[in-house]
Amino acid sequence: MSGDTRLSYLERLMLRLIVGASSFPDEVRNRHGEYVLAAQQPDGGWRGREGASDPYYTSFALRSLTMLGLLEGPVAERAADFLRSRTQGNETIVDLLSLIYSVKLIEAACGIDAFADLPTGWQARVPDLLERLRCADGGYGKTFESRAGSTYQTFLTLLCYQLLDYPVPSPEQVVEFLEGQRRPDGGFVEVRVGKRSGANPTAAGVGALVVLDRLTPEIGRAAAVFLSELQTAEGGFQANSRIPVADVLSTFTALVTLADAHAMDLIYRDAVEKYILSMERLGGGFAGFEFDVSEDVEYTFYGLGSLAMLNAASAR
């Protein structure tokens, strides 16, 4: 169920999003494209709702622009300069993945290699850094001091290995860890002591198994059934069964996982679309949940991505 193994997980996902976004009305494409472009900072990066530019939010902005066919010219050049400036610091694993993926996006879209002038061996040192996060349970932790693996962190680490075209050390141990994160309801937990499965750990668990080419139809279907039960009356998906409202992040990750499991038939697609459109802002961008008072580039990617996933599923 892993699909075309010649492409990385993130590349296959981006292709799906590009295909789905190709049917966006021009008004939607222009409005949200202008919002993301206007949010680029003088240093070439993008920021969240506060603070300075960082690789994390920059990655979401670049993904949206790629989806909309707008990653080009001076925008891409300035973004590449920003990313190059961040290779000298000590980034978290989340920012490291965002950095690597963003560079790959710009290179694919424009031929600009932000890593071209880096010291020899920079990328070769990344696996050593990643393995310092490896825990005794076979998963990857959030910090070097972590004693237990995180489902989400393990997924991110596998994506880093795949983007850099490095083999994952001891992959069977990672599979064993992921299987231990599953619960009888078909979902996954973030840490092993967790008792309640969630939408995002489930998406990370399924995604990690896809990367490792170990997602079975049984695991995929069980995860899809679990996620389908998180769809609310308003159409979106809850982070877990105790969260009273849906959010755009959980909705996007649920849709990606349902597509990976070939199980979009389990949900009410029209209701999902209605929910996502309710999070859209007239001036561009998407909010994150019903009571959110603002928007940002991260939720804008999730909103556009959700609509694109729905379109891609309908075209199949």
Image: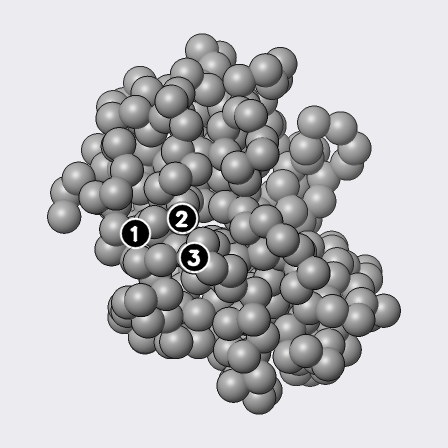
Q: Which numbered mark, 3 or 1, is in the foreground of this view?
A: 3
Query: Left or right: 75 with respect to 308?
Result: right
Find residue 233 and report its horizontal and vertical position in percent: 38, 22
**Is disc 3 placed on a helix, strand or loop?**
loop
Residue identifier under label 1: 259
What distance separates the C-alpha of mark 2 from that of mark 3?
6 Å
Q: Which numbered mark, 1 or 2, is in the foreground of this view?
A: 2
Residue farthest along the right direction in this orientation? 145
Q: Is residue 69 above or below residue 247?
A: below
**Is disc 2 placed on a helix, strand or loop?**
helix
Q: Amino acid at mark 2?
A: Phe
Residues marked 1 and 2 touching at CB (< 8 Å):
no
Residue identifier under label 2: 226
Q: Is residue 80 visible?
A: no
- Category of crowding for the residue at label 3, using alpha-carbon neighbours closer than 10 angstroms: few (below 14), some (14–19), many (at least 20): some
Residue in the foreground of this view, choosing between 95 and 37:
95
Query: Left or right: 259 with respect to 120?
Result: left
Query: Which quadrant is the N terminus positioned in?
Result: bottom left
Residues marked 2 and 3 touching at CB (< 8 Å):
yes
Question: Residue at horizontal 35%, vertical 51%?
Answer: 224
Find residue 305 and report its horizontal and vertical position in percent: 39, 39
Q: Amino acid at mark 1?
A: Ala
- Category of crowding for the residue at label 2, using alpha-carbon neighbours closer than 10 angstroms: few (below 14), some (14–19), many (at least 20): many
What distance separates the C-alpha of mark 3 from that of mark 1?
16 Å
Find residue 174 and report its horizontal and vertical position in percent: 56, 78
